[in-house]
């Protein structure tokens, strides 16, 4: 699905799948960025649960905003996805450290990463060439 014919053209179905997935990922990350920047009480409570300093949350929001901008700009989208992957990997480790539930908490950043990477892979022939699903 979504493979091009060598011309760099992506199927309509792959393009719409990419749009929907990217929109879901960006909406979640926009929400997460906003609540970190506003330093809302649930964010403060979560920081305590995770063993993180409360003052770190606003700085995390700034970092998230920068990463979100990088992801949304087509020229820097792949760089943004790479940097988000590192950020989300840290979230996985943080959740593991405090022994949160696997599928709902620990792996959730993986689901978000998939919502960022799969659309790029579907839309970008060079990325599919770099990371093929099959050899051919």
Image (cartoon, grey):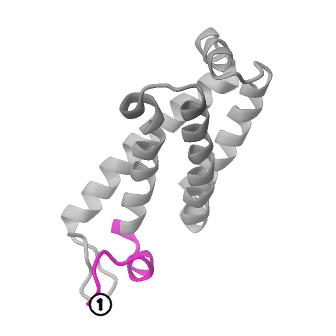
Number of numbered discs overlaid on the protein picture: 1
Residue at 58% from the left image edge and 12% from the top image edge: 42
Q: Nearer the viewer, residue 100 or 36?
A: 100
Above or below residue 73? Residue 3 is: below
Front residue of 46/59: it is 46
Is residue 27 located in the magenta-colored stretch of the structure?
Answer: no
Please tell me which residue is depicted at 39% across the width and 49% down the height of the picture: 115
Q: Which residue is mark 1?
A: 6
Depth check: give the residue in front, 92 or 1: 92
Residue 103 locus on image (x, y percent): 36, 33
Instruction: Please tell me which residue is depicted at 62% across the width and 52% down the height of the picture.
Output: 86
Could you say which quadrant of the image residue 49 lies in?
top right
Q: Is residue 42 above or below residue 130?
A: above
Residue 4 % position (x, y) = 27, 81
How far from the left and from the top, in percent, is residue 60? Answer: 71, 34
Quarter residue 76 falls in: bottom right
Horizontal side of residue 12 vs 51, given as left or right: left
Q: Secondary structure at mark 1?
A: loop
Question: In the image, what residue occupies the spot 64% across and 22% down?
Answer: 50
Q: Quadrant of residue 70?
A: bottom right
- For the C terminus, the image quarter is bottom left
Question: Which region of the structure is painted magenta?
Answer: 122-136
Residue 130 magenta-drawn?
yes
Q: Specify the quadrant that holds the N terminus.
A: bottom left
User: Residue 33's spot in the image, x, y percent?
Assistant: 61, 32
Give the class, few, some or many, for how many residues have Cα within 10 Å of label 1's Cα (few <14, many ≥20): few
């Amino acid at each position: 699905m979504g493979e091009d014919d060598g011309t760099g053209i992506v199927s309509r179905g792959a393009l719409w799948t990419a749009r929907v997935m990217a929109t879901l990922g960006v909406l979640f990350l926009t929400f997460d960025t906003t609540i970190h920047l506003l330093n809302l009480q649930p964010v403060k409570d979560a920081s305590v649960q995770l063993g993180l300093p409360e003052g770190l949350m606003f700085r995390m929001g700034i970092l998230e905003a920068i990463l979100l901008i990088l992801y949304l700009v087509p020229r820097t989208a792949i760089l943004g996805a790479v940097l988000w992957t590192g950020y989300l990997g840290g979230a996985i480790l943080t959740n593991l450290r405090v022994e949160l539930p696997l599928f709902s908490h620990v792996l959730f950043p993986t689901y978000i990463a998939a919502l960022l990477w799969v659309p790029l892979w579907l839309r970008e022939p060079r990325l599919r060439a770099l990371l093929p699903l099959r050899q051919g």
